[in-house]
Structure formats: structure tokens, C-alpha cells
Amino acid sequence: LPYTPEHRTQTRRRIVRSAQRLFNQHGFQGVSIDQIMAEAKLTRGGFYRHFSSKSDLYAEAMDCFFTNPECGNRWEGVEVDPAKGAVGAQIVRAYLSRQHFQDIQDSCPMVALPSDVARSNDSVKRAYETALGAMIEHLQADTDKTGHPTRAEALAIAAMCIGGMVVARASEDVAVADEVREAAKAAAMVMGGWTEFDA
Amino acid sequence: LPYTPEHRTQTRRRIVRSAQRLFNQHGFQGVSIDQIMAEAKLTRGGFYRHFSSKSDLYAEAMDCFFTNPECGNRWEGVEVDPAKGAVGAQIVRAYLSRQHFQDIQDSCPMVALPSDVARSNDSVKRAYETALGAMIEHLQADTDKTGHPTRAEALAIAAMCIGGMVVARASEDVAVADEVREAAKAAAMVMGGWTEFDA
DNA sequence: TGTACATCAGTGAACGCGCGTTCACTGATGTAC
DNA sequence: TGTACATCAGTGAACGCGCGTTCACTGATGTAC
């Protein structure tokens, strides 16, 4: 073998990470393979040694975000501290935070690419669904005795988090965006039964 | 004048309607001017007699959906009957209905194009914000004494409606999509204080 | 009423450009001797 | 230890195609006489 298998894996990972950032910012159709490869410090031609097509990479970039920790499992980014209350409450706060609003590059793709995914093929939609499943699971998990949303409640909380952020990002006025985020956050907290932990 | 002013207006409207349907289905970047003009029974070249650019049409298509009744004010499509309860409750039901889920062409663009809008210029975002404002207003309006959500509550209900639909459309499994819609609908009804009107 | 005209909505060929994908190649690397 | 080799990750030119936009034109229409 000319190169170590690790070399190949790392290059592939670098392409996926580059794609995640660029897709988040400009959407599937707004990003070229040239751009993705350039951000990964590579050139056009090498792409097809790692992926069979642009759509193929799209599905992997979406899937990778939550399920493959090697590509950076983003939920781990939310440091969960049992002392700070329920896991779900912390996720809601982080999800609807100003930081997540601003950080589009490393944003959750569920919020950065929903209408793109709706138009994509089944493997991309399946990846979206998996990501949603992971979020639901985290929302239902709990480190103490308070706030155990049912599956239906968790789905509604997820819809509120994603919807609130999606609407905030599509608004022109930052004041309106903030208003939407705060309203969604407050409502999600009530729905999860997490109101006893600060406002 | 060679043609009546109405002729010009009607052609322009036909282009906008065609654009609304196609943008809803394939997004801004997924639709060509050729396609838009063909669906409007016209040819490529005539486009620039009505619009200065594709982006220009995009902003108008978005704006037109709610504010310009000539282009088909979609909220009027939800026949509001005071006998059936609060206006807001009827809007929530219609918004999260299976019909709205399936009818992508004539869908609300807030749900069909949110991530596209987030990447667009300010005039498109302003149109989105206007549409949101119209929805909030309708949600707060009430034909009888029950269910008067505050502005914050109305914003949260709108986020829930949009988020629920966006997530449903991005899911691969229709059963999951239905589950999300129903969960979002139930939660929005509780938030609006409309639970006394059927489940 | 009929005709010549000016207007401009709509046509379709053409433009330059960037894209996804292919392909012949180069050269860095681990292995065999 | 040193060298020849086979492998294949990565390169960059090339391809065909579709796009947004431009432009010289055509021809349907309302108006003036």
C-alpha cells in the first residue's frame, strides 16, 4: 500500500467537513465541487476518488453531522452538566441561542438546509430523519427527575426549535429574529416542563 | 398604445404565479428563467421586459404571496367560518394539514423556501418578514372571545407551524412526517388556548 | 369606415461563464528483494 | 541498509451542457387621419 489507510480516511473526512460548512452557508446547489475541494486544500480531480457524485457527498455530510462522531458530533458541543438541570432544557437553550443563530457554518444542518433536503433524494431525507431521531432522543433523556417529555412532546419541541431558528434566519430585522428566538425558547421550555429551571 | 395596460399586467402576473409554483418545488437556484417563462406560455427573451433580474422576480414572488391579493392571497384560501371557532385555530389546522403537506406547488413559501430565503438578499428577507407579520396578525385575530394569543405566543405558534411542516417535508418516512405534523398541531392548539374546539 | 403608422410585448439566436464529471498523468509512499 | 517497483491519492486540462442575460427582430395592436 502506497499510503496508510488513515491517510485516505483523513482526506475523506476533510472533504466532508469542508462540505458541511459550505452547504450550511450556501445550500447544495450554491456550492461547487471546486469550492469544497479548495476548502479541503485539494483540487477538483481528486474528488471522485472519494465520492461517486456530489449528491453522494451531500447525504454523507448530512448523516455525518450527528451519527458519526469522527466528523464531529455536534450535540457533544453542548456541554451537558447535570447540575444545570435537564439535558433537554440545555439543548433547547443552546439550539435557540444567539450563537447558534450567528454561526451558520457550523450550524445544525436541520436548520440550515431543511428546504434543500425536502427537494433531495431519499438517502438525504433518511439522514435528516436520523438526525431528528437523535435530537428527540437527547430531548427525552434526562439527568434528574423533572421534565420527561413524551415522544409527541419531544417532536413538538424539536419542531419549535427548528422552526424558531429557521424563521429567525429568514427574517431581515435582527430584532424580529431575536423576538422569534426568545418566543420559541420560552414556549419550548414550557412544553418540556423545564420552567422551574430559570426563565 | 399598442396593447392595453391590462395585457401587460396580466402577463406579468402569469410570470409571477409560474415562478411561485416552480420556486416552491425546486428552490430559487433549481429553476431556470426558461422554465418559468415556459410555464407562463412565453419564451425566454420576454422576461427582461417585466423584471430586471431573476432575484428581482424572486422578491416579488415571495412578497406577492400574502400581500398582493391579485397574485392570490393564500390565507383567503383558508375559508374562515366564525361558527367553527377561532380564526387562529383554523389557520393552524389548515397549515399543518395533510393537504398543505402534499401541495408543494401552491404551498406557503415560508415553509417551502426558508433556507433559500436565509441565503438571499435583504429584499427577499423583508418579504419573508412581511409574510410572517401577516400570519401573526391572522393568528391573533379572533372571531369570538376565546383564544387571544399575545404577540410572543403568536410568534411561537407560527414557529411551530412552520417548523412542523418543514421537518415533516424533510423526512423520508411519511409516518414520521404525519407524527410530526400531528404533534406540532396539538402543541400549537394548546399554546393558542384553542383546545376547547375539538381535538 | 379604412388605411398608414408608431409602439412595444414577445421571439429566438447568440454570448460568455461556471458547473459536474472524465481522464491521462504525476509523484509520494510502503513493500520486496 | 539500499534500490527498483507497484500502487493509487491527487493533479489539472478537457468535455459537454445549461444557465442568466443581451440584442436585433417581428408582428399584433390602438390611434390618427
Image (tube, coloured by chain):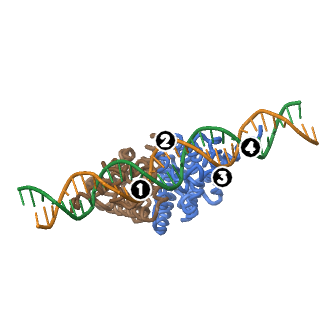
Chain colours: A blue, B brown, C green, D orange
Chain containing mark 1: B
Which residue is at a point 33% across and 55% down the rendered structure image? B46
Q: Mark 3: which secondary structure? A: loop
Q: Position of residue C26 (x, y in %)?
A: 73, 45
The vertical placement of B122 against B30, above or below, is: below
Which residue is at a point 36% across and 46% down the rendered structure image? B103
Chain containing mark 4: A
Foreground mark, 1 or 3, reads 3
Q: Position of residue B60 (x, y in %)?
A: 36, 60
Tag 4 and tag 3, C-beta contact below 8 Å: no
Q: Amino acid at mark 3?
A: Ala
Q: Amino acid at mark 4?
A: Glu
Q: Mark 4: which secondary structure? A: helix
Q: Nearer the viewer, residue B111 or A23?
A: A23
Marks 2 and 3 sit apart, C-alpha to C-alpha, by 30 Å
The residue at which mark 3 appears reads as A40
The residue at which mark 2 appears reads as B172
Marks 2 and 4 sit apart, C-alpha to C-alpha, by 33 Å
Q: Amino acid at mark 2?
A: Glu
The residue at which mark 1 appears reads as B110
Q: Mark 2: which secondary structure? A: loop
The residue at which mark 4 appears reads as A6
Tag 1 and tag 2, C-beta contact below 8 Å: no
Marks 1 and 3 sit apart, C-alpha to C-alpha, by 34 Å
